Image (cartoon, grey):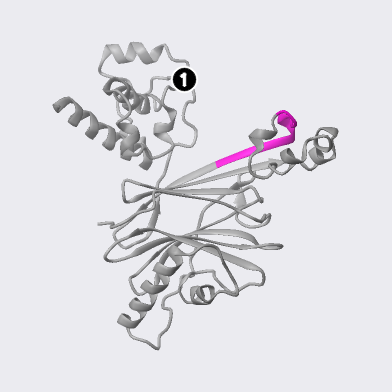
């Protein structure tokens, strides 16, 4: 069982990285690293490594941002993948969860002028050997990565980025903006909306769900990439819903949420009432009585959780 968890970590990248791990029009794509550190040191025993790693992990979890001059940063090179000491670099890390058999850490490494910021989610054996790693590199200095722990075993990685076009900084609107507004341009662009136009900026949102398996490895969950947006609850096909989120909906809405998932694949329902309801929707196209085999991992997980909640709610 997880003893403790940090439900949400949301960190702002302090430098841009423009050339690594980006596809799909500028979205950050989480990647699984193949080369994993197998042991911090072959010279000491398992128990010694375990004690040393736990002291390091506790210290990192309690620390603020570390520079290359800090002793703890030096120690990080023994345990954290991708922590080669770099000039003018910084490290920040937090424990997301802890079990008897493994630790899960989030950490970021940033460099002021060149390499930008690397966000990392990594699982460890108790003696500090890394098991698995997910790495995301921020594209701009406004990149924001949030990691949520959902229902103990499911993680959501959400990447958000905000781009101001270079042309905007040449406009009179920028030149005439108050200094207080200019100072917010990197992190609070909503405060600038009286000064910028839609064509001056672009926003990117990208997220993935991962399940932590028994071996401590992160398994990416498939999801429906393009659900019908005219559905009332399209998000039930794209992200894993947390238990407390499901509990906020009435049973009637949850039943519709379930049926919408099937209807989006063209399910022909045995209920004439449901068939009549969905045939009036512009996005619905009747195809088959059997569509369950088409569901994504995210949809299957949400269906299981929603149905379980409905069953309990009706019993009360």
Examine the structure image and report whether residue 202 is included in the region drawn in magenta.
yes
Question: Which quadrant of the figure contains the N terminus?
Answer: bottom left
Tell me how many marks there are: 1
As for residue 167 lying within the magenta part, the answer is no
Residue plotted at (71% across, 30% down): 198
- Quick check: can you spot residue 293? no
Q: Please report the residue visible at 77 percent of the width from the left and 41 percent of the height from the top.
A: 179
Residue 56 location, quadrant: bottom left
x, y percent for residue 23: 61, 48
- For image coordinates 71% across by 62% down, the residue present is 113
Q: Position of residue 312 (x, y in %)?
A: 18, 31
The answer to whether residue 83 is left or right of residue 260 is: right
Q: Quadrant of residue 136?
A: bottom right
Q: Which residues are magenta?
A: 194-205
Question: Residue 159 or 110: which is nearer the viewer?
Answer: 110
The structure residue drawn at horizontal position 56% and vertical position 74%, both measured from the top left corner, is 70
Residue at image mark 1: 283
Q: Position of residue 153 (x, y in %)?
A: 32, 51
Q: Is 283 placed above or below 107 here?
A: above
The one nearer the camera, 59 or 212, is 59
Position of residue 306 in the picture relative to residue 133 (left or right): left
């Amino acid at each position: 069982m997880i003893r403790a968890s940090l439900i949400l970590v949301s960190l702002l990248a302090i430098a841009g990285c423009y050339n690594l791990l980006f596809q799909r029009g500028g979205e950050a794509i989480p990647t699984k690293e193949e080369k994993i550190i197998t042991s911090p040191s072959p010279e000491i025993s398992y128990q010694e490594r375990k004690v040393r790693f736990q002291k390091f992990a506790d210290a990192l979890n309690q620390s603020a941002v570390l520079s290359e001059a800090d002793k703890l940063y030096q120690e990080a090179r023994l345990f954290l993948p991708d922590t080669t000491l770099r000039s003018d670099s910084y490290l920040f890390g937090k424990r997301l969860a802890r079990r008897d058999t493994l630790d899960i850490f989030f950490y970021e490494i940033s460099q002021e002028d060149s390499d930008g910021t690397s966000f990392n989610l990594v699982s460890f054996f108790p003696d500090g050997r890394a098991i698995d790693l997910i790495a995301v590199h921020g594209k701009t200095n406004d990149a924001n990565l949030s990691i949520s722990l959902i229902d103990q075993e499911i993680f959501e990685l959400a990447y958000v980025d905000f781009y101001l076009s270079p042309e905007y900084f040449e406009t009179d609107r920028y030149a005439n903006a108050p200094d207080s507004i200019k100072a917010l341009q990197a992190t609070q662009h909503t405060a600038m909306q009286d000064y910028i136009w839609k064509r001056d900026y672009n926003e990117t949102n990208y997220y993935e769900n991962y399940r932590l398996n028994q071996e401590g490895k992160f398994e990416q969950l498939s999801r429906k990439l393009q659900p019908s947006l005219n559905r009332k609850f399209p998000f039930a096909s794209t992200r894993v819903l947390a238990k407390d989120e499901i509990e906020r909906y009435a049973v009637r809405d949850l039943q519709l949420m379930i049926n919408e998932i099937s209807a989006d694949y063209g399910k022909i329902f045995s209920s004439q009432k449901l068939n009549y309801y969905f045939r009036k929707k512009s996005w619905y196209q009747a195809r088959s009585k059997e569509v369950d085999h088409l569901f994504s991992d995210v949809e299957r997980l949400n269906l299981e959780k929603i149905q379980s909640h409905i069953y309990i709610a009706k019993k009360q």
